[in-house]
Image (cartoon, helix red, strand yellow):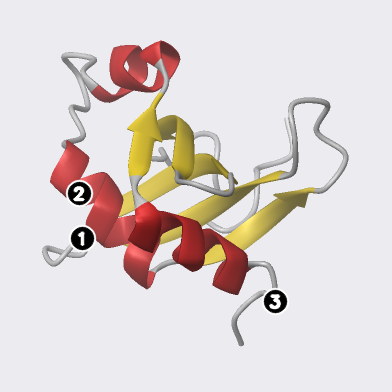
């Protein structure tokens, strides 16, 4: 079942998308490069796995989505009135996440 806040995220995504400098730095890391198209695809078809309603910069969330090739992508984003802000996006790893990539491993 989809998280209720997801409708707000998708509405912002349909209006536009903006990436932070931090998002591009993480996305373009040599080890696990993530493209803009992959982020859009994963955000559009994903679901919220963590909600951050009290983020001081405005409500944000962590989305788990998959590309057409079934590659998992985590996206931290913040919907604004005019667009969706992508704070960061990366391919999650099994050393930090459970096999379904929905829960953090206990360290």
Toward the bottom, the furthest residue is 1
Total label count?
3
On the picture, is 78 further left or further right than 22?
right
Q: CA distance from mark 3 to mark 1?
A: 22 Å
What residue is drawn where x is 80% and y is 33%?
A: 55
Circles 2 and 1: CB atoms closer than 8 Å: yes
Q: Is residue 72 above or below residue 91?
A: below
Q: In the structure shown, which secondary structural element does the residue marked by tag 2 occupy?
A: helix
Residue 7 in view of the camera:
yes
Q: Nearer the viewer, residue 37 or 95?
A: 37
How many residues crowd around disc 3 within 10 Å: few (fewer than 14), some, or many (20 or more)?
few
What residue is drawn where x is 57% and y is 73%?
A: 7
Residue 61 image offset from top left, x and y in percent: 64, 48
On the picture, is 73 further left or further right than 51?
left
Q: Is residue 75 above or below residue 11?
A: above
The N terminus: image quadrant: bottom right
Q: Which residue is mark 1?
A: 67
Q: CA distance from mark 2 to mark 1?
A: 6 Å
What residue is drawn where x is 55% and y is 35%?
A: 96
Toward the front, the furthest residue is 82
Toward the right, the furthest residue is 54
Tag 1 or tag 3, which sits nearer the N-term?
3
On the picture, is 17 further left or further right than 12?
left
**Between tags 3 and 1, which lies in front?**
3
The C terminus: image quadrant: top right
Circles 3 and 2: CB atoms closer than 8 Å: no
Residue 100 in view of the camera:
no
Q: In the structure shown, which secondary structural element does the residue marked by tag 1 occupy?
A: loop
Q: Which residue is mark 2?
A: 38
Q: Which residue is mark 3?
A: 4
């Amino acid at each position: 079942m989809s998280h209720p806040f997801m409708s707000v995220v998708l509405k912002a995504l349909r209006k536009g998308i903006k990436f932070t400098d931090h998002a591009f730095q993480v996305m373009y890391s040599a080890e696990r490069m993530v493209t803009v198209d992959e982020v859009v695809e994963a955000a559009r078809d994903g679901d919220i796995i963590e909600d951050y309603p009290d983020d001081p910069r405005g409500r944000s969330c962590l989305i788990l989505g998959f590309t057409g090739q079934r590659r998992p992508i985590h996206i931290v984003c913040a919907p604004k009135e005019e667009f969706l802000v992508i704070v960061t996006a990366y391919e999650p790893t099994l050393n930090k996440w459970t096999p379904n990539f929905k829960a953090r491993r206990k360290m």
